[in-house]
Every structure is written in C-alpha cells, then in structure tokens.
Image (cartoon, grey):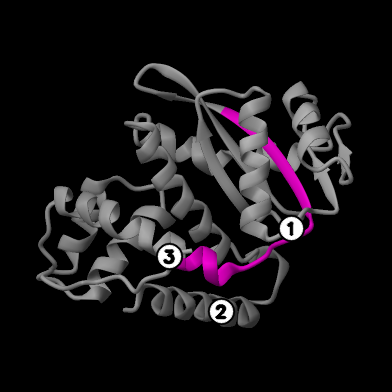
C-alpha cells in the first residue's frame, strides 16, 4: 500500500491549514463554501475552489495513511448496500463495519449482483489480511452466492434484524449526500466516502459511554494521530 508522505511543496499555505481544511470537510456536514467561510472568520482567505482542489489532491493520500495506521479491525463483519444517485442513475454503496461500528471499507459499484459481492468480499479480505469469524448480512442472494465461493468456512448470519447495525451506519452518508445534492461521479463518491469513513472511525469516540476526562484524553489522541498522519 502506498503510504508516501504528502507533499505540500509549492503551496502558499502551510500543511496545518491545508490538512485542517480537509479535516473540516470530511469530519462535518459542510460544503466547500461553508469551509471557505469558516476560514474567513479566522482571517484565512481561500476560495471554495481551492478547498475543493485541496480535498481532491490530499484526501486520497490521507486516506491511505489512515487506513494503514488503522490496521485490522473487528472479526464480525456487518455488510449492507445502499442505493445512491449519481448523475440521475442508481449506484450501489457497499459498506462493511465491525462489531464496534467502525467502518472497515466502502466500495461504490454499479451493480449489486454476485460479481459485485465477490469483488467487495475479496477487497475486504485483502484489506484486513484474512477472513472474519462471522459475516452478518441481509437476505440479498448475492451475499449467499459470494459467501459460498469466496469464504465458505465463515459463519454467515442473515436473520431478520441481524444487520440493523450496518443499515444504521449509512445515516451519516445520507446526510452528506443530501447536503452535497448528490455525488458528481463514482470516483468522487468513492474518494470522499473512503476518507469520510476513516475520519469517523478516528473521531467517533462514544462520548455518552465515558467520563468527560477520558473522552478529552481520547480526543486529544485522535487529533495527534491526525496530525502525524497528515504530517502537519
């Protein structure tokens, strides 16, 4: 996996500002113009087009480094696919999360047939370095067919309501999709959602499950990981 250090050469603004812009856009439900306004309030003058270019250029590099640092996640994979509209056509967003709700991987495809499911399964196995203990899905027949071909030894659970966790995980994507008025292309959707999922993993700390002092400590650690990842 390519984890080359992001290069900020020939950019007028330092790495701290560029990485902060990318973080704002992928961490919160904001548009390029709203990021421009947030920066303007701090006395930093950039155009929304510059924000877009920074996200497009540095987002994939940040995603690769975050994914490499994240390593292997849980051994129970909850899979689900959701319909998204791109240029007026229905596409399918395949998502896998673990038992803790962390996003394992995301793949945008034109189909949700057996071939598409096999492609996603193999991508997951390659990214995680092995098969899970449990595979939890809905009753889509493509999952059954791909399961039998790719990892038949893994226990497959597709009972009613067993996959609610994965279905709920689409909500942040739905909010962002609505705010963006849809994705412009398959590539743009894949690029944005990959870093969006990794950023959510890093900063989704479960505030309601811990005391404030522990939450602040973990949040500080998350910011430190982000700074090390983007080399800021």
First reached walking from the N terminus: tag 3 or tag 1: 3
Residue 129 in sight from this viewpoint: yes
**With respect to residue 161, does 77 lie above or below?**
below
Label 2 environment density (alpha carbons within 10 Å; few <14, some 14–19, many ≥20): some
Quarter of the image where one finds residue 204: bottom right
| Residue on which the image places disc 2 | 216
Camera-nearest residue between 214 and 107: 107
Q: Position of residue 42 (x, y in %)?
A: 18, 69
Q: Nearer the viewer, mark 2 or mark 1?
A: 1
| Residue on which the image places disc 1 | 130
For residue 215, side relative to residue 181 (left or right): right
| Residue on which the image places disc 3 | 2
Q: Secondary structure at mark 1?
A: loop
Residue 24 in sight from this viewpoint: no
Q: Is residue 206 magenta?
A: no
How many tags in the picture?
3
Magenta extent: 65-82
The residue depicted at 69 percent of the width and 41 percent of the height is: 166
First reached walking from the N terminus: tag 3 or tag 2: 3
In the rendered image, which quarter contains the C terminus? bottom left
Camera-nearest residue between 197 and 30: 197
Q: Position of residue 45 (x, y in %)?
A: 10, 62
**With respect to residue 156, does 89 lie above or below?**
above
Label 1 environment density (alpha carbons within 10 Å; few <14, some 14–19, many ≥20): few
């Amino acid at each position: 996996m390519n984890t080359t250090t992001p290069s900020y050469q020939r950019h007028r603004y330092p790495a701290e500002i560029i990485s902060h812009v990318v973080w704002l856009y992928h961490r919160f439900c904001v548009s390029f113009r709203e990021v421009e306004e947030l920066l303007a309030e701090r006395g930093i003058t950039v155009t929304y087009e510059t924000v877009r270019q920074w996200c497009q250029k540095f987002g994939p590099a940040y995603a690769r480094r975050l994914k490499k640092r994240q390593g292997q996640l849980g051994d129970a994979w909850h899979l689900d696919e959701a319909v998204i509209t791109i240029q007026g056509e229905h596409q399918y967003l395949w998502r896998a999360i673990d038992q803790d709700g962390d996003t394992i991987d995301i793949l945008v495809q034109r189909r949700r047939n057996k071939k598409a499911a096999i492609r996603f399964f193999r991508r997951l196995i390659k990214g995680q370095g092995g098969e899970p203990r449990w595979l939890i899905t809905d009753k889509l027949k493509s999952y059954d067919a791909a399961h039998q071909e790719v990892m038949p030894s893994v226990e497959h659970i597709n009972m009613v309501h067993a996959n609610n966790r994965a279905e709920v995980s689409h909500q942040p994507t739905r909010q962002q999709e609505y705010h963006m008025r849809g994705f412009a292309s398959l590539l743009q959707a894949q690029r944005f959602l990959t870093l969006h999922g990794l950023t959510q993993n890093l900063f989704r700390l479960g505030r309601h499950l811990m005391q404030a002092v522990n939450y602040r400590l973990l949040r500080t650690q998350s910011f430190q990981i982000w700074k090390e990842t983007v080399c800021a």
